[in-house]
Image (cartoon, rainbow, N blue to C red):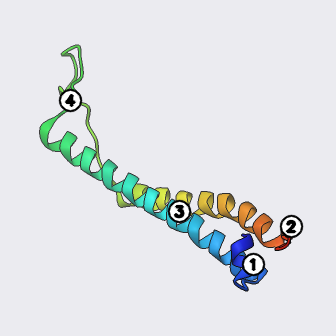
Amino acid sequence: MAILKALGASQKVIQKIFLTEGFLLAGLGGLMGMFIAFIVCVLQQKFHLLKLEGGTFVVDYYPVKMHILDFLLVGVTVFIVALLAAWVPARKAATKHFSLKS
């Protein structure tokens, strides 16, 4: 942050950098997680990777079904958590005073 201040960044710019970084990390993590979940569900539906023991069930494998609403709900949840998780450090970074001289 001292380097950003030395380069002339204002408090708003520093806060924007921290918020952008938080959203970028959360967005990439959320998208990667949803992509992996999609692949696992497709593999389960096609190859029946997780079997059910007992033999008394209608199906022999663990059934999965994907809904777009589930993915949207996860996306909204990731956004809200990212906002809460990035806002506090961004605000602290913007209001912290640094001296460029020691």
Residue type marked 3: Val
Q: Which residue lies furthest to the top in this view?
A: 54
Left or right of 101, for residue 71: left
Reading the image, the residue beneath label 3 is 76
Above or below, 29 relative to 20 = above
Give the CA separation, mark 4 to mark 2: 66 Å
Please state which of the two labelled residues, at mark 1 or mark 4, is closer to the viewer: 1
Which of marks 2 and 1 precedes in the sequence?
A: 1
Query: What percent of the width, then of the height, locates residue 2?
Result: 74, 71
Pointers 1 and 2 in contact (C-beta within 8 Å): no
73 or 30, nearer to the observer: 30
Which of marks 4 and 1 precedes in the sequence?
A: 1
Residue at image location 75% in from the left, 78% down from the top: 5
Query: What percent of the width, then of the height, locates residue 64?
Result: 28, 41
Left or right of 2, for residue 39: left
**Residue 61: mark:** 4
Give the CA separation, mark 3 to mark 4: 31 Å
* Structural crowding at the residue carrying mark 2, measured as other residues with C-alpha within 10 Å and reported as few (<14), some (14–19) or many (≥20): few
Residue at image location 26% in from the left, 44% down from the top: 40
* Structural crowding at the residue carrying mark 1, measured as other residues with C-alpha within 10 Å and reported as few (<14), some (14–19) or many (≥20): some
Q: Which residue lies furthest to the left in this view?
A: 47
Q: Is mark 1 on a helix, strand or loop?
A: helix
Query: What percent of the width, then of the height, locates residue 19?
Result: 64, 70
Give the CA separation, mark 1 to mark 3: 33 Å
Q: What element carries label 4?
A: loop
Please state which of the two labelled residues, at mark 3 or mark 2, is closer to the viewer: 2
Q: Is mark 2 on a helix, strand or loop?
A: loop
* Structural crowding at the residue carrying mark 4, measured as other residues with C-alpha within 10 Å and reported as few (<14), some (14–19) or many (≥20): some
15 or 60, nearer to the observer: 15
Reading the image, the residue beneath label 2 is 102
